[in-house]
Amino acid sequence: MIIGSRPTKFQVVVDKNQCMLCGRCVDNCSYGVFRMEPEEIITNTRNCVACHRCISQCPRDAITIKERPCDYRSHPVWTAQVKENIFKQAESGKILLGGMGNAAQYPILFDHLVLDACQVTNPSIDPLREPMELRTYIGKKPRQLEFIQKSDTDISLVTELVPNLKLETPIMIGHMSYGAISLNAHKAMAKAVSDIGTFMGTGEGGLHEALYPYQDHMIVQVASGRFGVDVNYLERGAAIEIKIGQGAKPGIGGHLPGEKVCADVSCTRMIPEGSDAISPAPHHDIYSIEDLKQLVISLKEATEWKKPVFVKIAAVHNVAAIAAGIARSGADAVVIDGFRGGTGAAPSVFRDHVGIPIEAAVAAVDTKLRRQGIRNEVSIIASGGIRQSADVAKAICLGADAVYIGTAALVAMGCRVCGTCYRGLCTWGIATQRPDLVARLDPEEASHNVKNLIEAWTLELAELMGAAGINSIESLRGNRDRLRGYMLDQSMLDVLDVKPIGA
Amino acid sequence: MCGIIGVIDKQRELMDGSSIRDALSIMDERGSGEGAGYAAYGVYPDYADLYAIHVFYDNLVEPKTQVEDLLETWGMIEHDEEIPTWEQAGIPKIHTPWRYFFRPKTRLMQRSRTPDDEIVKHIVMEVNKSIKGALIFSSGKNIGVFKASGWPEEVADFYRVEKYEGYLWLAHNRYPTNTPGWWGGAHPFNLLNWSVVHNGEITSYGTNRRYIESFGYDCTMYTDTEVVAYLMDLLVRRHGLTQELAVRALAPPFWDEIERMPEDIQRLNTALRLTYGSAMMNGPFAIAVASPDSIVGFSDRIKLRPLVIGEHDNKVFISSEEAAIRTVDSAIKNIYMPKAGHPIVGRTVA
């Protein structure tokens, strides 16, 4: 051990005057930070991940967690993070893993876009008194309608609409698999979306029986591993999503460690218990856009053309051209996952360095599809880094029909974004399969929190629309005039196709 | 603000422009002297089957040559002349208005159901986008738009609109807030046989513009109203909707109203909203759209701008103010305000 130990990240202090030695911190910490001695609680600070479970459960507010100041020599280039990553790899010779989203210091474009509001010439609309329509239909739309004119007054519609998902709010919950997160977390979110009238993704882990009651609000996923995919699964979903890529790790597959594959997960995924679930980087039957088209059509055929089929890709620099190809593959919606998308586990080099922000990706895709005259025929769902209702409004102005949230829904259930989901020790019972931890998450209660969050954002979105003098979400979609760029350079303004503030 | 007045005679009886001038002038409070205009249908009976193309020229050398080259490429100019104008104290003559009576060579635009319209639309977009110093502001058959920066009466006197006789008139007094008052920004906006006047703002303009541009229309006037003319052209001429259905698409009923409709009507309205969601217009507006056989008036879905309809004998009036209608026809009895979003159509029968 030439390298020696690395400094601890956090400092956990138990105030002896406050502590009543109830031992809840010991029971609640799955990372082994606390130990009960006869007269006091002893902490092993090194194990702390700052999940804050102990703080939240301490009845006497006796625990403090602080980020420890760095004790390396400060350096603008060779930062503590860079050095520690080198130490870790020098020891292990392995790829470094990280959970949750991109943690690198890129500017957040959403925070450099501001929304518009009406003043004298154009009245703002008060959502408390006037109708405000947030209903959104996701799916294929005809380019134009066809009619038969029988007489001067009698005209009838010939065009048949294909099935669309009807959302009462443009906010859905994105795909997180059973396996990566617990069944209780899934149940909580599924109940919330059914109550609200929106949808959530199953992730690539199949659909557990406990979620069958909510299946009309579930989007089932077909990923490269094909876990849990059979015709029964496809038929249960309200829509089907083919996952080509995800924002946290564009260009690579997935890996659920064998330890997380308990009996229930093994059954839902249709793989042996305790075996690693490996999703290959590519789908081994998709090596071209034509192959994708065949899969889209096969899935439609298998479900008698009753379900919309989405295709999800990671936001990469050529995303607009790829999305245009997907739009022509017969897919009903293209899901674009930005580089701030969360994940259970990803090589941190991918998470932090591959892909592009969702703001730029959505703007580029919307523009490309419009130039090709096909934007109206396919829906765009934006995900990866949606943190608040303003982000939803801005994503829609840039061209999205709806958004997926992921991390935000987990945070609503208690997640503190400690970023160690891949260890399966989640103290909140979210990203774990350990029965004692899973039991900590009450699905009813958590469902209520998720529902509250989406409802609160929906109210805020209605207010933002009203302030912009808009009473229907269709008129916000792709409405770049209602955005202005703040401190963005000209090239970024051009990509986003928004004017600078003051213009 | 802005004031609008429109009138159609269902029997195609001709009216000269004097009473419309007076009706518009009494709404001077609704303007700021930065734009007014008139559109008249039936004003060029001698050239009724040719496209009357009105152009503003910044000078009569380079832009005029370029426009004429383009017209000659796509068809034949059968007659052209400067549009007669009379100096007005309040109107500096920034542009020279010119008119062409143009016959397109239909065979040059294959694969279109309406090749001659398509040629003229292409010429309008091309000139307005690419030829500096030229702007086509009127391009229909037997139709003329007369507009400039100025007060209603000045613009009327500038063109002497009382000399023109039409069976359908639209007029507009502008109070610009979003974009500068300039000749091209004055209403009516016209493309082919569509003319549009508008009071209000279209908050969905960003969405509407990007939608219409994906069908090959270029928005060059720096103002929200021009999309309405293009949307009507797309929905009615190219997509075959009736004018009532087109208005339904532009100002659709709310979802909860749709849900209460009988099933087949519900299906139609759902299809319209899903297909033409990006064409729907939001914000405060009262709009009148004219075509050779009809005039359609409608307001936004929650009626944030005034719209008054008057009917008397063979005439249907659409205006921002009752007083304007009464200025034209003091004997009128049937005056009412339509429901939000509902189209009111006056149609010729002759």
Image: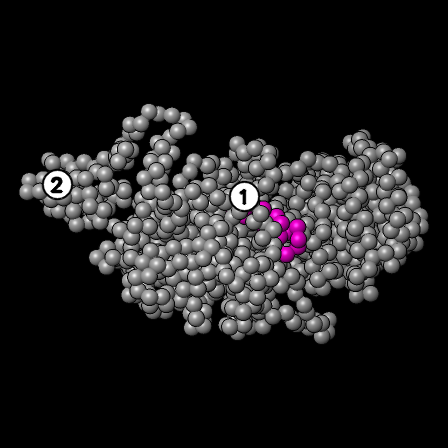
| Chain at numbered mark 1 | A
Residue B81: name its quadrant: top right
- Horizontal side of residue A308 vs A190, given as left or right: right
Give the main secondary structure of the magenta stretch: helix
Residue A140 x/y as whole percent: 57, 62
Q: Amino acid at mark 1?
A: Ala
Question: Which residue is drawn at the image coordinates 37% and 59% (left, top)?
Answer: A277
- Horizontal side of residue A407 vs B289, given as left or right: left
Residue A223 visible in the current orientation = yes
The secondary element bearing badge 2 is classed as: strand
Question: Which residue is drawn at the image coordinates 23% and 55% (left, top)?
Answer: A437
Residue B152 x/y as whole percent: 75, 40
- Horizontal side of residue A63 vs A151, given as left or right: left
Q: Amino acid at mark 2?
A: Ile
Q: Nearer the viewer, residue A317 or B281?
A: A317
Q: Nearer the viewer, residue A208 or B113?
A: A208
Look at mark 2 in the image and give the residue it sits on: A41
Q: Which residues are magenta?
A: A358-374
When the figure is inspected, residue A42 is found, relative to residue A407, above or below; the finding is above
| Chain at numbered mark 2 | A
- Mark 2 → mark 1, Cα distance in angstroms: 50 Å
Mark whose residue sits in front, 2 or 1: 2
Question: Which residue is drawn at the image coordinates 56% and 61% (left, top)?
Answer: A292
Look at mark 1 in the image and give the residue it sits on: A360
Colour setup of the view:
one colour
Whether residue B76 is in magenta: the answer is no
Q: Nearer the viewer, residue B206 or A329?
A: A329
Whether residue A368 is in magenta: the answer is yes
* Same chain check for tags 2 and 1: yes
Of the image marks 2 and 1, the number of the one nearer the N terminus: 2
Residue B108 x/y as whole percent: 86, 56
